[in-house]
Image (spheres, rainbow, N blue to C red):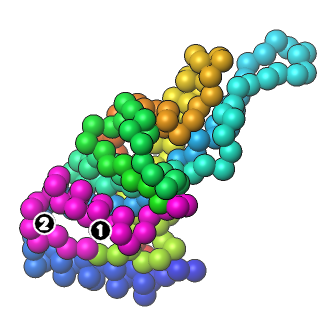
Amino acid sequence: MAFNKTEISLFFELLGQLMEKHRFVAKNIYNCDETGISTVQTPGKILAAKGQKRVGSITSWERGKNITLLCAMSAAGGYIPPMFIFPRKRLISLLEKDGPAGALYKCSDNGWINEHLFVEWLAHLKQHAKSNHMHMLSLPPHTSHRTQPLDVSFFGPLKMAYKKECDLFLKSHLVENKTPYDVASLVRKAFNNIASISKGESGFRSTKSGSIH
């Protein structure tokens, strides 16, 4: 219901005003959003001999730990190193082990972003973007499935790639468990495999053409 002509038209009107005034090029237009990364691995499909009824799979022992991943992707297919937010009181260096180059690591009580952490994210973004004159435009609430480039072209493939890396990790560490200390490394592998120019261009192109006429 939120994806209606009035809300979407207003968004594109405001976007048009910004573009007309500042003439932003594609490499300077970023979409920013968050997604959840779990330490719990859902087992995928398993091949077994015909007729075998009980087939086991390895899964993580730790339950209920969701980690927020904040990403930014440009219309030209550029990416800002992500921000991890762990659900804990204090950050320790092991949580950053083998993570994405230049990534930012923070903590909050529930693993969600808050006002303070968003300001830190903006400072992080500024280091990798133009040094002055940042402009923010909010997407209409409850429309991200159609208007959010990251939702349309990036987060789905990223989570599939992350799941694949988790599967490989658990199968190759038969006596170990996946913990929050393994997440940064697994995200790095998935992120590097998925973050492409074409996904950035596709996400922005699809959300533009998906507007209501």
Q: Position of residue 27 (x, y in %)?
A: 16, 54
Look at 26% across and 60% down and name the residue there: 30
Residue at far bottom of view: 6
User: Label 1 vs label 2: CA separation?
Assistant: 23 Å
Q: Nearer the viewer, residue 201 or 54?
A: 54
Q: Position of residue 25 (x, y in %)?
A: 13, 61
Q: Position of residue 116 (x, y in %)?
A: 35, 69
- Left of 39 or right of it: where is 193? left
Q: Identify the magenta region.
A: 109-136
Q: Amino acid at mark 1?
A: Val
Look at 42% across and 48% down and name the residue there: 91
First of labels 1, 2 by sequence position: 2
Above or below, 113 against 128 in this view is below
Q: Nearer the viewer, mark 1 or mark 2?
A: 1
Above or below, 100 against 2 in this view is above
Image quarter in which the C terminus is found: bottom left
- Residue 119, labelled with which disc? 1
- Left of 200 or right of it: where is 171? right
Q: Amino acid at mark 2?
A: Phe
